[in-house]
Image (spheres, rainbow, N blue to C red):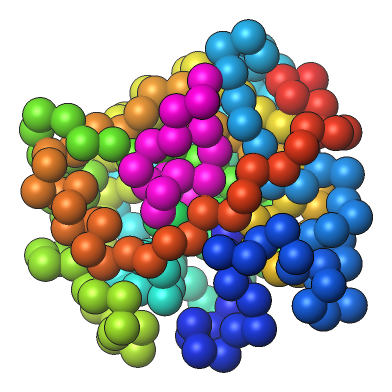
Amino acid sequence: MTDHGLIQDLDWAYEASFNWGSINPEYSTCQTGTQQSPIALTLSNGLSRSHIPRFNYNGQTAGNFYNWGYGPAFTIAHPEGNFTGNPSFSFDNTTLYLRGWHIHAPADHSVANDRAKAELHLVHVDAEGHEAAVLAIRLDPGNANSTFFNQMPQPLIGFNETSTEIPMSIDLDLVLENAQYFNEYWTYEGSLTSPPCHEGIRWYIARQTLFMSVNQMRSILLASRFSARSEQEVWLHNINA
């Protein structure tokens, strides 16, 4: 999860994520934080019955499809600084607003030592635009096309075309349907998965994997670069608490 610019402008790399804290003083939390993401999950953690998410995603949503430098992404069109009209979800009497989504490949989170081929992050912010929660859905190949990814332009934009944006509307309810509206999930208190690794992020990881056809999966991987941070040691993450 990140807000950074083009790959060539970065002073860090996913392949060297163990040392981010020593690159720049602003990244010190990457090294010293107590709730760093991602983490490994297992069924022995159980599934959460707390912080239950309630969705208001409104069907078709306008925005821009592009490549964030590491894979496909989508940012919602909204009046400058006003996120409250965006699709939203609520938990614990808090409402957060979808800013957009992007894909990491391979998946950030492993489950029972299995790492999916990719992971989609739905990034939510508060009314002031501060990142506050991420809904994560693991992506793997199956036997049929995903109705959600059927909406994307084909072929997907290559990773070297980060300046290209395609205005379009997509039905975001389809991605929630594929994840069974997060009726089964893990949740924990975590961080951004790229520098500056700010903490205070509520993570939800759907138990349900989003499956797609082999061709769709290959298209996503072709448009992606390695973007999985090394998994972090569990510390004060309060998994499912």
Q: Residue at x 62, y 31 (%)?
A: 40
Q: Is residue 80 above or below residue 74?
A: below
Q: Depth check: 6 or 154 in front?
A: 6
Q: Depth check: 187 or 131 in front?
A: 187
Q: Residue at x 39, y 23 (%)?
A: 208
Q: Does residue 125 appear to the left or right of 198 in the view shown?
A: left
Res. 2 in view: no
Q: Does residue 180 appear to the left or right of 228 in the view shown?
A: left
Residue 184 is situated, as x and y percent measured from the top left of the image, at 50, 17
Residue 70 is situated, as x and y percent measured from the top left of the image, at 41, 69
Q: Quadrant of residue 153?
A: bottom left
- Is residue 111 found inside the magenta-colored segment of the image? yes
Q: Magenta part of the protein: which range?
A: 105-122
Residue 164 is situated, as x and y percent measured from the top left of the image, at 29, 85
- Is residue 144 found inside the magenta-colored segment of the image? no
Residue 62 is situated, as x and y percent measured from the top left of the image, at 33, 66
Q: Is residue 220 above or below residue 117?
A: below
| Quarter occupied by the C terminus | top right
Q: Residue at x 66, y 83 (%)?
A: 11
| Quarter occupied by the N terminus | bottom right
Q: Quadrant of residue 44?
A: top right
